[in-house]
Image (cartoon, grey):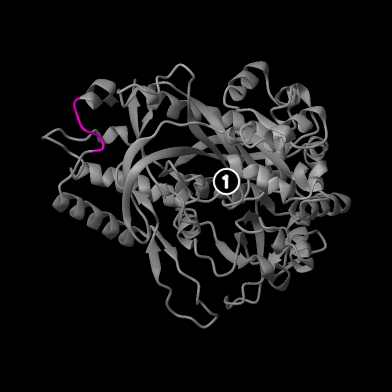
C-alpha cells in the first residue's frame, strides 16, 4: 500500500522525458483502441451508413492521489444510500411534496408525474424494482487546512467526503471507468510509472468491476421475474431502452455482452426510445411482448426487465414518448428504474433530504448521522422564508460566488456557477426560479496531472470526483416500520467511477468534453 512517507521521497506525478512520455501516450491510445475505450462519432450517421469513426474517451495519464480511508468510506456508505433511495422510490406522497413546486414549470417533471399517475390509476402489475445508482462525491478541504503550506499533500490529508449529487436514472460511465481502471493498472504493472528503480505500488490502484456488477443485478432481476407469463412468448429477455444514433455505445454494449456471456445466458436486446410502441405490446395480463424485427422466429419475446438508458430529456416526451413510457410502466416487467425511481434523481429531492426530519422518515438514527455528514448546504428557491433568503444570496454578485445553481436535468452542462448566477436569474422569470436549487460549492484539493482528450494532451492543476455504483433489487411493502417501505432483495456497492478535470473548469461530464476518466491512487495518511 502507498503511504505518505513513500510519497515524500518521490516526485508524483513523475516528470518523464519526452521519449518516455511519447511512449506512454502511445500505449494509452493503443490500449483504448484494443479495449473499446471509445466514443462513436455519429454526426453524419444515417440509416444506411456502414462505418462510424470512433475517438478515444478522455483519460488521465497519471492517477489522482486520494485518501484510502475516504474511498472506503464512500463504498461503505453506498448500501445505506441504496436503502434510502429505494425507500423514497416507494413513497409517492413524499416525492410529490418534494417536487410539487416544479411540476408546473419543469416539462420533464410534469411528464413523469403524469405518467406515474396514469400507471397508478391502471394499477401497478409489478412490485419488484431494480436500481443502478451512482452517488457522486468530492473531497472538501476542511477549514483547518493551511492553504499556504508548501506541503503538497497537506490538503489531501485534511478533506471530508461531500456528496455532489445522487443519480438514480440512466447512470453512465460505469463501463468507461472499468476500462480506465484496467488501463492504469496495466500501465503500472509494466513499469511505465516506476521512477529511480522504485516500482509503482500497483495495489494502490483499486480494481473495478462495474461491468459485471451492473450485469449481475440485471441478471438477478431477470431470474426473479421467472418464466414467461404469456403463452405467446418464446422466452424472456431484458430490454435496454436507448437513444437513437447513440455515441456512447462503448459504455452500454459491454453490459449487454456480459449478460450474453454468462454461463446461464441472459438474453437482452436494444430498442430505441421512440420505437417502443411500434415493436412492443401489452397482453391482457400486461406482459410486455417485444417483436425484434431481425429475428426469424414469429414468436415475440417477453420482457423481464426494462433497463432505461433513455428518456431523461423533456423533448423525448412528446405524445409518442409519453405513451411509450406509460406502456413500459404499466407492464409486468421489472423496471430499472420505475418512474418514481426516476423522479428521485431530481435535485429537488436531494435538497428536500437536507430538510430537518427528512432522513429520519427512512433511516435509523445511526444511518441518518452517517449520511448527513456527507451533505453540504442546499437551499430551495421558492417563496418560503428560507427560499427568499436563498434568492437574496443567489442575486448578490458577491455572496453567489460560493454557490452553484442546479436544475433537475441530467447530462451535464446545465448548471450555473458563482457570479454568473445573478445575471442568469435576472433573465429568467421569477415564477421559474423554484425549479432550481442553490448548493454551496465544494472546495477540493488539486494536483498536477496530464489529461488526454480527443484532440490534444494537456497538463495543469486538476480536481477529481468519485462516483460509487449502487446495485439493488427490492420489493414494495405496505409495512412502514422504522421508515421501511421496501424489502431489500439485493443491496451492494458494485464499483466506482473516478473523473478528473482541470481545476479552472466547472463541469465534469466526460462525454461532453469537460473531464476525463481516471483511477484513484489510494494513499494512507
Question: In the image, residue 249 lies at what x, y percent?
Answer: 49, 62
Tell me: 442 left or right of 499. Answer: right
Residue 12 relative to residue 323: left or right: left
On screen, residue 65 versus residue 354, left or right, reads left
Disc 1 crowd, CA 10 A, few/some/many (<14, 14-19, 20+):
some
The N terminus: image quadrant: top left
At x 51%, y 44%, the residue is: 506
As drawn, the residue found furthest toward the left would be: 197
The relative height of residue 105 versus residue 363 in the rendered view (above or below) is below
Q: Is residue 511 above or below residue 210?
A: below
- Residue 106 picture location, percent across and down: 76, 51
Q: Residue at x 62, y 72 (%)?
A: 292
Q: Position of residue 239 (x, y in %)?
A: 61, 60
Instruction: Name the chief secondary structure element in magenta.
Output: loop
Residue at the spot of label 1: 220
Identify which residue is drawn at 11% across, 35% down: 197
Q: Is residue 12 magenta?
A: yes
Identify the magenta region: 9-13
Locate residue 8: give its quadrant. top left
Q: Quadrant of residue 498?
A: top left
Q: Farthest residue to the right: give it.
A: 121
Amino acid at each position: 500500500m502507498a503511504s505518505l512517507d513513500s510519497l515524500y521521497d518521490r516526485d508524483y506525478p513523475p516528470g518523464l522525458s519526452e521519449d518516455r512520455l511519447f511512449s506512454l501516450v502511445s500505449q494509452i491510445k493503443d490500449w483504448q483502441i484494443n479495449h473499446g475505450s471509445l466514443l462513436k462519432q455519429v454526426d453524419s450517421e444515417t440509416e444506411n451508413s456502414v462505418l462510424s469513426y470512433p475517438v478515444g474517451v478522455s483519460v488521465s495519464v497519471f492517477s489522482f492521489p486520494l485518501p484510502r480511508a475516504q474511498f472506503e468510506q464512500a463504498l461503505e456508505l453506498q448500501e445505506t444510500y441504496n436503502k434510502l433511495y429505494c425507500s423514497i422510490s416507494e413513497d409517492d406522497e413524499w416525492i410529490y411534496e418534494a417536487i410539487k413546486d416544479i411540476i408546473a414549470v419543469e416539462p420533464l417533471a410534469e411528464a413523469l408525474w403524469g405518467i406515474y399517475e396514469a400507471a397508478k390509476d391502471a394499477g401497478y402489475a409489478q412490485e419488484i424494482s431494480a436500481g443502478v445508482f451512482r452517488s457522486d462525491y468530492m473531497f472538501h478541504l476542511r477549514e483547518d487546512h493551511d492553504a499556504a503550506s508548501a506541503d503538497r499533500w497537506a490538503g489531501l490529508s485534511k478533506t471530508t467526503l461531500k456528496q455532489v449529487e445522487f443519480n438514480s436514472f440512466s447512470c453512465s460511465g460505469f463501463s468507461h471507468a472499468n476500462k480506465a481502471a484496467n488501463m492504469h493498472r496495466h500501465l503500472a504493472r509494466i513499469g511505465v510509472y516506476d521512477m529511480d528503480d522504485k516500482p509503482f505500488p500497483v495495489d494502490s490502484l483499486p480494481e473495478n468491476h462495474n461491468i459485471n456488477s451492473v450485469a449481475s443485478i440485471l441478471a438477478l432481476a431477470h431470474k426473479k421475474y421467472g418464466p414467461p407469463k404469456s403463452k405467446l412468448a418464446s422466452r424472456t429477455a431484458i430490454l435496454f431502452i436507448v437513444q437513437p444514433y447513440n455515441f456512447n455505445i462503448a459504455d452500454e454494449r459491454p453490459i449487454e455482452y456480459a449478460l450474453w456471456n454468462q454461463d446461464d445466458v441472459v438474453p437482452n436486446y436494444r430498442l430505441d426510445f421512440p420505437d417502443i410502441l411500434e415493436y412492443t405490446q401489452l397482453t391482457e395480463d400486461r406482459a410486455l411482448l417485444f417483436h425484434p424485427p431481425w429475428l426469424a422466429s414469429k414468436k415475440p419475446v417477453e420482457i423481464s426487465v426494462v433497463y432505461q438508458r433513455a428518456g431523461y430529456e423533456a423533448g423525448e416526451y412528446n405524445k409518442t414518448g409519453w405513451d411509450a413510457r406509460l406502456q413500459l410502466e404499466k407492464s409486468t416487467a421489472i423496471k430499472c428504474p420505475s418512474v418514481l425511481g426516476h423522479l428521485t434523481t431530481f435535485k429537488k429531492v436531494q435538497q428536500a433530504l437536507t430538510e430537518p426530519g427528512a432522513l429520519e422518515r427512512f433511516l435509523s438514527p445511526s444511518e441518518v448521522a452517517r449520511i448527513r455528514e456527507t451533505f453540504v448546504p442546499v437551499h430551495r428557491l421558492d417563496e418560503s422564508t428560507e427560499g427568499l433568503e436563498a434568492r437574496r444570496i443567489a442575486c448578490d454578485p458577491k455572496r453567489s460566488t460560493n454557490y452553484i445553481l442546479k436544475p433537475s436535468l441530467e447530462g451535464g452542462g446545465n448548471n450555473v456557477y458563482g457570479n454568473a448566477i445573478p445575471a442568469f436569474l435576472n433573465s429568467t422569470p421569477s415564477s421559474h426560479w423554484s425549479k432550481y436549487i442553490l448548493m454551496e460549492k465544494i472546495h477540493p484539493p488539486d494536483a498536477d496531472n496530464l489529461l488526454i482528450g480527443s484532440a490534444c494532451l494537456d497538463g495543469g492543476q486538476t480536481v477529481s470526483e468519485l462516483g460509487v455504483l449502487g446495485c439493488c433489487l427490492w420489493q414494495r411493502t405496505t409495512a412502514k416500520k422504522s421508515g421501511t417501505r421496501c424489502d431489500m432483495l439485493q443491496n451492494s456497492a458494485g464499483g466506482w467511477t473516478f473523473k478528473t478535470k482541470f481545476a479552472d473548469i466547472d463541469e465534469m461530464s466526460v462525454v461532453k468534453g469537460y473531464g476525463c476518466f481516471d483511477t484513484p491512487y489510494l494513499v494512507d495518511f
